[in-house]
């Protein structure tokens, strides 16, 4: 496995750990951020039932994100060609168009990856990568929603905002 691929796998694994370790805090932030966004956008008719439905959707997206970062998840059972095909399909389907953000993540990983990194150097590179790039695809989701807010984008946006807040506010282990 090349150094960039190794660094990216360690990046996904660390994000998985961070989200798992902070799941309860994230759920609380999701509720708080959703309330604030409803007020900020002046979303009419957002009663308790509708709020609960959007909160539940955001929590489901959080669980989906945790699983997407899972280092032993289903996506790792496929060879690299199939993973590339799946990524291309995802880029075409996602409303937030995360390709540019993914390309920046790859470039950042390539700058940090070194031959024969020991575990300490690898973990430091992961922390630096998370500090620089955040949790992919949060930046694309946030920018896409803020450029064109919509109720169909709201749960993704809330999860992205909560994730970035938690990741940026927590000591990452260095």
Image (tube, helix red, strand yellow):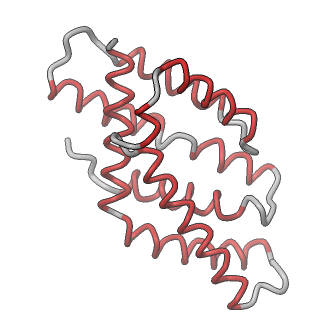
Q: Which of 81 and 128 is in front in this view?
A: 81
Residue 76: x, y in percent? 41, 33
Quick one: 11 or 63, which is closer to the camera? 63
In the image, is residue 32 above or below residue 152? below
Q: Quadrant of residue 50?
A: bottom right
Please identify the quarter of the rendering in which residue 102 is found: top right
Q: Dividing the image into 4 quarters, which one contains the N terminus?
A: top left
Q: Considering only vertical position in the picture, is 66 above or below 13?
A: below
Count how many numbered circles sit on residues in the image: 0
Q: In which quarter of the image is residue 35?
A: bottom right
Relative side of 117 to 87, left or right: left
Q: Which residue is drawn at 38% across and 66% down?
A: 23
Is residue 133 rendered to the left or right of residue 23? right
Question: Can you give x and y, in whole percent of width and height, for residue 18 in the image?
Answer: 33, 53
Give the residue furthest to the top. 115
Q: Residue at x 32, y 22 (%)?
A: 6
Residue at x 34% of width, y 12% of height: 2
Q: In this view, does 46 lie to the left or right of 80?
A: right
Residue 57 percent location from the top left of the image:
62, 69
The quarter of the picture where the C terminus appears is top left
Along the line of sight, which residue is nearer the eye, 88 or 42? 88
Residue occupying image coordinates x 59% and y 67%: 58
Q: Residue 68's spot in the image, x, y percent? A: 47, 46
* In the foreground, 84 or 105: 84
């Amino acid at each position: 496995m090349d150094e960039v691929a190794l660094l990216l796998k360690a990046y996904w694994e660390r994000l998985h750990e961070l989200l798992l370790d902070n799941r309860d805090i994230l759920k609380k932030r999701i509720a708080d951020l959703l309330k604030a966004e409803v007020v900020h956008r002046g979303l009419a008719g957002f009663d308790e039932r509708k709020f609960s439905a959007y909160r539940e959707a955001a929590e489901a997206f959080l669980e989906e994100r945790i699983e997407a970062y899972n280092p032993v998840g289903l996506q790792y059972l496929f060879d690299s060609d199939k993973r590339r095909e799946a990524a291309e399909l995802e880029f075409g389907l996602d409303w937030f168009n995360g390709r540019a953000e993914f390309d920046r993540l790859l470039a950042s990983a390539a700058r940090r990856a070194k031959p024969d990194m020991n575990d300490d150097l690898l973990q430091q590179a992961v922390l630096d990568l998370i500090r620089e790039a955040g949790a992919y695809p949060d930046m694309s989701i946030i920018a896409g929603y803020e450029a064109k807010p919509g109720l169909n984008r709201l749960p993704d946006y809330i999860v992205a905002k909560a994730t970035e807040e938690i990741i940026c506010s927590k000591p990452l282990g260095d």
